[in-house]
Amino acid sequence: EVQLVESGGGLVQPGGSLRLSCAASGFTLSSYEMNWVRQAPGKGLEWISHITSSTSNVYYADSVKGRFTISRDNAKNSVYLQMNSLRAEDTAVYYCASFGSRGNWFDPWGQGTLVTVSS
Amino acid sequence: EIVMTQSPATLSVSPGERATLSCRASQSISTNLAWYQQKPGQAPRLLIYGASTRATDIPARFSGSGSGTEFTLTISSLQSEDFAVYSCQQYNNWPPTFSFGPGTIVDIK
């Protein structure tokens, strides 16, 4: 079964840092371009970051550029999101998601991990 | 930046009835549009990509149409498991600036 599992969420103070992980099972993550998408409580979905498969080119939404860093370790079948200088507005469920097999839609998704930024 | 809007915000439908959801892009995105279903406490699930192609294992009662700036998701006969939030997403840009619509809540009438 193809599965993505996020971990690393939790409560952090404003200005703090957190590192999220996304582990793949049932498929070889190195072949896929990966993304992080978040959803603030009661809000819609927001794409925040993308990493290509082989060249590891990275892209970010303006809302996180300069604060978040996406990376991957293909040997560990995992993708990461390093989040620095966290703000209250970063509070959300964070999902990792693969691109679809033939295009730039998101499939599959992980179950999500909650990040709460609060003092 | 491509802005996605959806209407209505909430759609109340009786089981067995047809539901029609709309999604609009602020500029042409060809058919580079996906639809997702999301239930409370769950991750989104891909329903439709390429504006009209059903994803694997998606029932035939779900259909998508449209191109350019206007798109529609139709659920032909609503089942109890279809009551959820439906979001559209454009993937027309590269470098990526993918954007989602705010979602339409389909609830029981």
Image (cartoon, coloured by chain):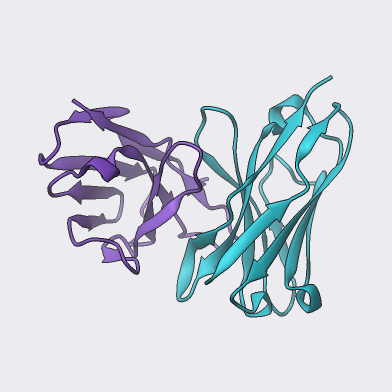
Chain colours: A cyan, B purple
Closer-to-camera residue (A76/A40): A76
Judged left or right of residue B25, residue A81 is: right
Locate the C terminus of chain B and report the quarter of the image it occupies: top left
Q: For the view shown, which residue lies furthest in the left direction?
A: B17
Task: Identify the residue at image location x=53%, y=52%.
Answer: B98
Judged left or right of residue B90, residue A3 is: right
Whether residue B29 is visible here, answered yes or no, is: no
Whether residue A68 is visible here, answered yes or no, is: yes
Residue B70 vertical placement versus B85 (above, below): below
Residue B78 vertical placement versus B29 (above, below): above
Residue A28 vertical placement versus B65 (above, below): below
Task: Identify the residue at image location x=51%, y=27%.
Answer: A42
Closer-to-camera residue (B107/B99): B107
Q: For the view shown, which residue lies furthest in the top direction?
A: A119
Image-quadrant location for residue B15:
top left
How many marks do you count on the picture? Answer: 0
Judged left or right of residue B19, residue A71 is: right
Residue B80 x/y as whole percent: 23, 41
Closer-to-camera residue (A110/B25): A110
Residue A87 vertical placement versus A56 (above, below): above
Task: Identify the residue at image location x=10%, y=41%.
Answer: B16
Q: For the view shown, which residue lies furthest in the right direction?
A: A16
Image-quadrant location for residue A6:
bottom right
Residue B95 x/y as whole percent: 61, 62
Residue B83 x/y as whole percent: 29, 38
Residue B61 x/y as whole percent: 17, 56
